[in-house]
Amino acid sequence: MKLFLSFVLMSVFLAFPSSTRAKETPLRLAVAANFAPVLDKIAGDFSARTGIKTSVTVASSGTLFAQIRNGAPFDIFLSADARRPQQLVSENLADSDSLIAYATGKLAYVSDNPAISDVDTLIASLNHNPGRLAIAHPELAPYGRAALQFLQKSGLEDEFAGRLVRGKNVLQAWQYFETGNVSQALVAASLVANKHEGKVVIPSFLHDEITQKLVIPGSSERHHDAMRFICYLVSESVQRSLKSAGYEPVQTPGVCR
């Protein structure tokens, strides 16, 4: 009798297509730390509209990239740069048709000094009183690399030698400032969108453009649902909302029109 019951249960399980079983699990989103607060709301709105649940894993772009290369099961990788998603495509580890820009990021300086209001006063202040400065790790996080480029192009690299406090991602760098471990930080503008004093958005000519791209890893079995989420993210209405969150919007790609 037990053997017969086991056979019946197995038959019922196999009767459902794998795609049906897959939809019972959330769509797995791997996102760079800078975009995590924004993605949380977008993912919630998407789930409310479609009924497709999501789960979000947050880390630096470099960490997520390494995890995907080692077989981590994600359905969408939202990087803070273009290089890592492109490399996954080049290594045949991601779908080339899903390689899409979803936002353009901005770098921002933040401190408790309200007198710092533009890039000129910022550079003068950093020259006069360097102090410890939190940034994301340049080898792991694009915003950390942009922060280092800003210091180099502003002639401040030597001033901050030995003074940089590196977070494993840009969110951790921001937390160093928030908790008072440092008095200043260079982070994603999205993390300080609601701060009005002591903040300077760094002009883009002082660092490489931060084009943020996403891609569907080859291990994903949810390609259709992943593309539905991607097209929602790059839709005109969602992109308009990114402006107030510290990003420049992108044009909706042809694949989503």
Image (cartoon, helix red, strand yellow):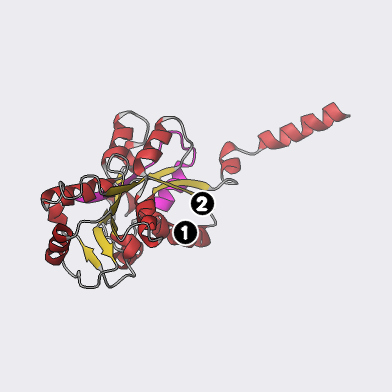
User: Magenta residues?
Assistant: 208-231
* Residue hosting label 1: 46
Q: Secondary structure at mark 1?
A: helix
Percent of width and height locating residue 154: 11, 53
| Residue 248 in sight here | no
Q: Residue at x 23, y 51 (%)?
A: 147
In depth, the one of 35 and 224 nearer the eye is 35
Q: Is residue 219 magenta?
A: yes
Q: How many marks?
A: 2
Q: Residue at x 24, y 73 (%)?
A: 114
Kindly give the residue lying farthest to the right in the view shown.
1
Whether residues under marks 2 and 1 lie with C-beta atoms below 8 angstroms apart, the answer is yes
Is 99 situated above or below 3? below
* Residue hosting label 2: 54
Percent of width and height locating residue 9: 76, 35
Q: Residue at x 14, y 47 (%)?
A: 152
In primary-sequence order, the first of circles 2 and 1 is 1
Q: Is residue 47 magenta?
A: no
Left or right of residue 182: residue 229: right
